[in-house]
Amino acid sequence: MIGIINYGLGNINAIKNIYQEFDIKVVEISNEDQFISDIKKIILPGVGSFDNAVKNLKQQNLINKLKEFSNDKNNYLLGICVGMQILGYSSEEGSEKGLGLIPGKIIRFNKEYITPNMGWQSIQIKSNDLIFKNIDNHSKFYFLHSYYFQANTNKNILSTSKYFHEFPSAVVNKNIYGIQFHPEKSHEEGKKILINFYRL
Amino acid sequence: MISQRLVVGLQLFKGKLIKTTSFDKENFSYLGDVLNAVRIFNEKRVEELIIYDLDAAVSKNINFEILEKISRVSRMPLCYGGGIDTIEKAKKIFSLGFEKISFNTLIYDNLELIKNISEIIGKQSIVFSIDYKKILNDYICFKNSGSFNTGIKVVDLINLNYQDFIGEIVLNDIENDGSMKGYNNHLIEQIYKNIKIPITLSGGFRDLEDVKNIFQRYKIIGICCSSIFVYKGANKAVLLNYPDLEQINKLKNF
């Protein structure tokens, strides 16, 4: 069973469709009562801007619940795109505080660059984590973002990608994962990541 | 550091997959079942799919049912355009699993609404689809599926600095749509240096060699083709096709 945080306008169906293809049960979580003990894996998809995402989580009383959930080492959390970014401390995109579950802050790509970084980019895998099981180094994934996660230390970086310069495209802190690209929109390799997460 | 996208553009009309020439809605070719096409393009690992509903663009009745089915069989990024004129419709399409929504007529008729939608779903998901024709020496924006001359020059529209609330501009060359004459890059050549958001070019691409030439010229660019990916041969027999990963790498390699 997989829980997906529904906090407004997340692209939830794209993720659900993939798990359903593998007969994996997906439960939507939109309030604190829906955190049930059967759910050991939760996906936090991206919603609009950084501040919007944090505000929506606050309104639905989900922030403390998510922190509690991640404190239990038997649980796993995966943030995707803006869902990854709000796992950091803060963002240049807004003034809200992130969840602070992975040490780092969110930086805007230089305004002189064409942004968002849109399209398929390869990842350079830095760590043999199970989330990348059966995924070749330099595989390509779909990106759509103008901000990126700047991790405080390299030990939290699972993979990097390059748009004008290198940036972390996947990060981890123990049982908490964040990926910048969209596995739900990245064909076979993307599916593998979502299934790998399910099997952690 | 390059970012080049090879996009498949599909047109819907009354629930069927069609291909127009020069945006002519009286005289188009039927290509068949849209879901079948989406399934095939998904298997071919298409980088991105844009769906325009020409019927919904006029009637404003969006065929959500078919969009939901399209989303269910797709594992690739999806963009939809046609008849989005309320926040609710925009949200609905987004929630079905599309990551980008495209606007044309609303750019000229109700820009405020697009800004509101952008605030809610995020600017990276908002696409300006600009249909243009060359009139005398200027490239002029058209609305209502290419039927209404707005009198606004594309260069002027793009200089209005929309990057605070949109994430992409698609440039559709109306007269070359479906012509397969070869891409005319005069317009993009004029504006490329000044743009700060991704641009996608559409209309008139002849073949993959033509695509490659444009990729060689612009490091960050999207190319959206229809005819190349739905027709085969001089007689334009319907055959859905898309280059494999190795071919794509060659197209982008320079």
Image (cartoon, rainbow, N blue to C red):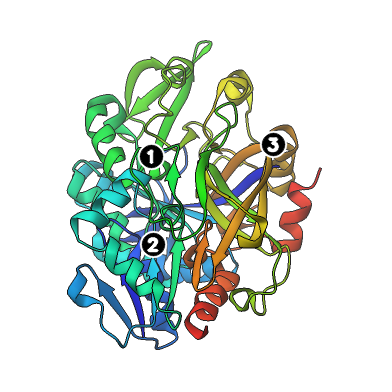
Image coordinates for residue B37, horizontal then vertical, percent? 47, 66
Nearest-to-viewer mark from 1 and 3: 1
What secondary structure is marked by label 1?
A: helix
Q: Are marks 1 and 3 on the same chain?
A: yes
- Mark 3–mark 2 distance (CA, rounded to whole Å): 30 Å
Q: Disc number at residue B219? A: 3
Q: Residue at x 75, y 55 (%)?
A: B249
In this rendering, the answer to whether B251 lies above or below B149 is below
- Give the residue number, with chain letter if any, for mark 2: A45
Residue underneath mark 1: B123
Q: Quadrant of residue B27?
A: top left
Residue at 24 percent across and 53 percent down: it is A56
Question: Taking the image as drawn, is residue B129 in sight?
Answer: yes
Q: Find residue B7 and report its horizontal and vertical position in percent.
A: 55, 50
Residue A196's place in the image compared with B246, above or below, is below
Q: Give above or below for A102 relative to B156.
A: below
Residue B26 seen in the figure: no
Q: Is residue B172 left or right of residue A110?
A: left
